[in-house]
Image: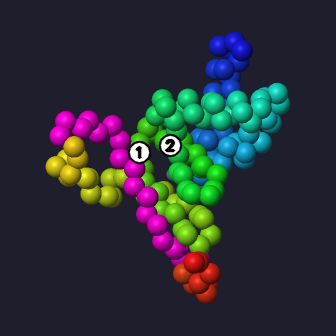
Amino acid sequence: MTMVRQTRQRQAVIEVLRASRGHPDAAWIHGQVRGQLPQVSLGTVYRTLDALVRDGVVMTIERAGQATRYDYKHAGEDHHHAVCRGCGAIFDVDAGAVPSIPAAALPAGFQITGVRLEFMGHCPDCTSRPAQDS
Ligand SMILES: [Zn+2]
Ligand SMILES: [Zn+2]
């Protein structure tokens, strides 16, 4: 594989994620990218996403038993997520609205490069429906 192709795939994945305000999984991203680059495989999309996560361009939301969701870091900002345990909806939470973690709680000398918080609960839609959650 050539650098040029890798760059185009990377750019296509970034554009799909940037345009999406949802939190799609790799299969959905693959479907969108194939609209532009029909030859791209799902494996390539996974590898591209892994590289973007390593580079800090994309963040992940992982939940046991479910496909990892991906999110573009708009303006390079970290944000947090609130995940509904009823319907699985994912909401963005402004990192600026959340108090910072006291450094004293961390191992001595630990260098913080990012903070990720996940709030679990039920969204307004699920709260107004009869409970089905276990
Ligand atoms: Zn919900
Ligand atoms: Zn998000």
Q: Position of residue 131 (x, y in %)?
A: 59, 84
Q: What element carries label 1?
A: loop
Give the quarter of the image for residue 44: top right
Between tags 1 and 2, which lies in front?
A: 2
- Is 106 placed left or right of 84 in the picture? left
Q: Is mark 2 on a helix, strand or loop?
A: strand
Q: Do the residues labelled 1 and 2 touch (CB within 8 Å)?
A: yes
Q: Position of residue 114 (x, y in %)?
A: 35, 42
Q: Which residue is drawn at 53% across and 51% down?
A: 61
Please tell me whether residue 123 belongs to the stretch shown in magenta.
yes
In the image, residue 11 sits, relative to residue 22, either above or below, namely: above
Kind of residue at badge 1: Asp
Q: Does any portion of residue 11 appear in the rendered image? A: no
Q: Nearer the viewer, residue 42 or 81?
A: 42
Query: On residue 23, which mark appears?
Result: none
The residue at label 1 has a CB less than 8 Å from ligand 2: no
Q: Where is residue 128 in the image (x, y as percent from the top left)?
A: 57, 84
Q: Does any portion of residue 84 appear in the rendered image? A: yes
In the image, residue 46 sits, relative to residue 129, either above or below, namely: above
Q: Residue at x 65, y 13 (%)?
A: 3
Which residues are the magenta region?
A: 108-126
Query: On residue 59, which mark appears?
Result: 2
The residue at label 2 has a CB less than 8 Å from ligand 2: yes
Q: Residue at x 52, y 63 (%)?
A: 83
- Please name the residue that numbered disc 1 is placed on: 78
